[in-house]
Every structure is written in structure tokens, then in C-alpha cells.
């Protein structure tokens, strides 16, 4: 995944092998690697639209919040149990107050979406989603007023596609 900072000067890249890199766009150079390849997983990234905050997978079952102004790093979310969770999508709300985390678990066969308050690191809600055993796409976004959660899910192998709107 790829995400730009609000001012467009930084680019975060989450690679398929789990690495997450931070790039200086005007200088066309790597600023630093935020994660290494210790835990193979698909790297996911999302910049806050209003602050210089970056949410990124730091391992398959964890999302770290990087404050690029202060240099502080904090764990924002950990998978709730011992299942093999994998973060598939990250997205900030438009006001930057919440982070939406879409994650899947195998072999338990459950996907879920968490809405996390960024300032307190508290989970505000958790929502189960559809599951597919094969390659699929899942994403979630909050409405601009943070009152509705939209869940998109695609299971191409069984030709099942859905979009759900949940009133939070």
C-alpha cells in the first residue's frame, strides 16, 4: 500500500514482504525503513489527513502509530487473540481522529474491522465481516461525520461482492 503525507512531501510504502519505508518525495530518497522483514506479511500504511501521523503495520498482528513531528512511536492496535491475524487495510477518518483497521484471520476464517480512537488508542467498536478462504479484497471507510462505517468485500473465487453501511 502507498500513502502520502498531508503536505505531499513524504510517501509511505508498505511492501508485500512486510517492510514499511518512508520516502522524501522532493528529494527522491529513502528517509528510513520503519520496519524490517522479521515477520512476513503484507505491509499496510495510512497517513492522517490532518497531522503528520503515519499508521503502519509493524508486524502481521500489530499497527504502530508514528508521529513524524516528534519522532514518537506507539502501538495503536494489537490483534485480540492468538489467531493468525493479518492487517489488510488501514484508513484514517477525514478528521484524523480515528483509524479503521480491516484484518483477516486464518484458519479461524473470520475478518473484522476495528475503529480505534487515535488520541486514546482505545477501540471504539469492532465489526465482523464476510470471510473467504481464497484471495479477496476487504476495505472499510468512515463517513465524513464518523457516524457510518462502509465495508467493502470481494471474494472473486465465488463471485461474491458486497458493500455494507453500518450506523455506528
Image (spheres, grey):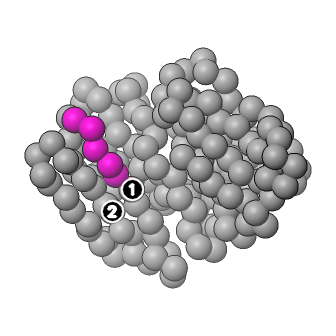
Q: How many neighbours does mark 1 have within 10 angstroms: few (below 14), some (14-19), or many (20 or more)?
A: some
On screen, residue 57 above or below 4: above
N-terminal of the pair, mark 2 or mark 1, is: 1
Measuring from the top left, give residue 16's x and y in whole percent: 51, 32
Nearer to us in this view, 107 or 75: 107
Residue 111, which numbered label? none
- The structure residue drawn at horizontal position 24% and vertical position 30%, both measured from the top left corner, is 108
**What's the distance in space between the residues labelled 2 and 1, CA to CA?**
6 Å
Residue drawn 54% across and 21% down?
39
Give the residue at the far left of this rendering. 158
Q: Is residue 146 above or below residue 41?
A: below
Q: Secondary structure at mark 2?
A: strand
- Tell me whether the residue at label 2 lies in contact with that at label 1, contact meaning CB atoms closer than 8 angstroms: yes
Please check the rendered image and state whether residue 137 is part of the magenta-colored stretch, yes or no: yes
Residue closer to the observer: 23 or 148: 23
- Residue placed under numbered mark 1 in the picture: 139
The residue where tag 2 is placed is 151
Instruction: Give the residue at x 35% y 40%.
Output: 104
Q: Main secondary structure of the magenta part?
A: loop
Side of 63 where 105 appears, left or right = left
For mark 1, give the secondary structure.
strand
The answer to which of 164 and 42 lies nearer the viewer is 42
Asked whether 84 or 28 is in front, the reply is: 28
Taking 132 as reference, is 19 left or right? right
Question: Does any portion of residue 81 appear in the rendered image?
Answer: yes
Question: The magenta stretch spans which residues?
Answer: 134-138
x, y percent for residue 149: 39, 69
Is residue 89 shown in magenta? Answer: no
The answer to whether residue 120 of the structure is visible from this angle is: no
Amino acid at each position: 500500500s502507498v500513502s502520502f503525507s498531508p503536505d505531499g512531501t513524504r510517501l509511505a510504502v508498505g511492501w508485500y514482504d512486510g517492510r514499511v519505508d518512508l520516502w522524501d518525495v522532493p528529494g527522491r530518497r529513502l528517509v528510513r525503513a520503519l520496519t524490517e522483514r522479521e515477520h512476513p506479511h503484507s505491509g499496510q500504511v495510512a497517513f492522517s489527513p490532518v497531522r503528520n501521523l503515519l499508521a503502519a503495520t509493524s508486524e502481521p498482528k500489530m499497527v504502530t502509530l508514528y508521529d513524524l513531528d516528534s519522532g514518537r512511536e506507539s502501538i495503536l492496535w494489537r490483534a485480540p487473540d492468538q489467531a493468525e491475524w493479518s492487517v489488510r487495510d488501514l484508513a484514517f477518518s477525514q478528521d484524523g481522529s480515528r483509524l479503521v483497521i480491516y484484518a483477516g484471520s486464518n484458519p479461524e476464517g473470520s475478518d473484522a474491522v476495528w475503529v480505534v480512537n487515535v488520541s486514546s488508542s482505545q477501540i471504539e467498536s469492532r465489526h465482523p465481516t464476510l470471510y473467504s478462504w481464497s484471495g479477496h479484497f476487504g476495505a472499510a471507510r468512515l463517513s465524513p461525520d464518523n457516524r457510518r462505517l462502509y465495508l467493502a468485500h470481494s471474494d472473486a473465487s465465488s463471485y461474491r461482492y458486497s458493500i455494507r453501511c453500518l450506523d455506528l
